[in-house]
Image (cartoon, rainbow, N blue to C red):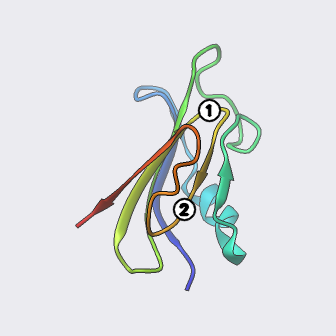
Amino acid sequence: MSIKIQSARYGLPDRHNDVTARIQLMAQDSNRTIAINNESMGGDPAYGHGKTLTVAYYGDDGRLHMTEGAEGSTILLGDESHGLPGSSQWSIG
């Protein structure tokens, strides 16, 4: 089963890029590790500021999950937290 990305946003609360389609493409073929940087996210929506990637997605367990990570870190899209540097994860529902 593949992960279904519900939404993904990269940047600051008031200046961000919608990267939902980009993250969905990255998550295909069981690639669940996402490097967070301006290049992989398609640009810099807030030059000179530290940015965050926030992703809401349906995991293999069919439940909605949310994870986020800081620019320069890596997140892992899965059904449970994997403790990667700069990432946190919540299960919703």
- The image shows residue 49, relative to residue 30, as above or below, that is above
Q: Residue at x 45, y 69 (%)?
A: 79
In this rendered view, identify the residue nearer to me: 25 or 29. 29
Q: Quadrant of residue 40?
A: top right
Q: Quadrant of the C terminus?
A: bottom left
46 relative position to 91: left or right = right
Numbered badge on residue 71: 1
Query: How many numbered circles does the render carry?
Result: 2
Label 2, label 1: how many angstroms apart (C-alpha)? 16 Å
Numbered badge on residue 77: 2
Q: Residue at x 38, y 62 (%)?
A: 65
Secondary element under disc 2, as helix, strand or loop, is: loop
Q: Residues within 10 Å of mark 2 (few under 14, many from 20)?
A: many
Q: Residues within 10 Å of mark 1 (few under 14, many from 20)?
A: some
Residue 37 is situated, as x and y percent measured from the top left of the image, at 70, 36
Going by the numbered disc 1, the residue's amino acid type is Glu
Q: Residue at x 34, y 74 (%)?
A: 63
The earlier-in-sequence mark between 2 and 1 is: 1
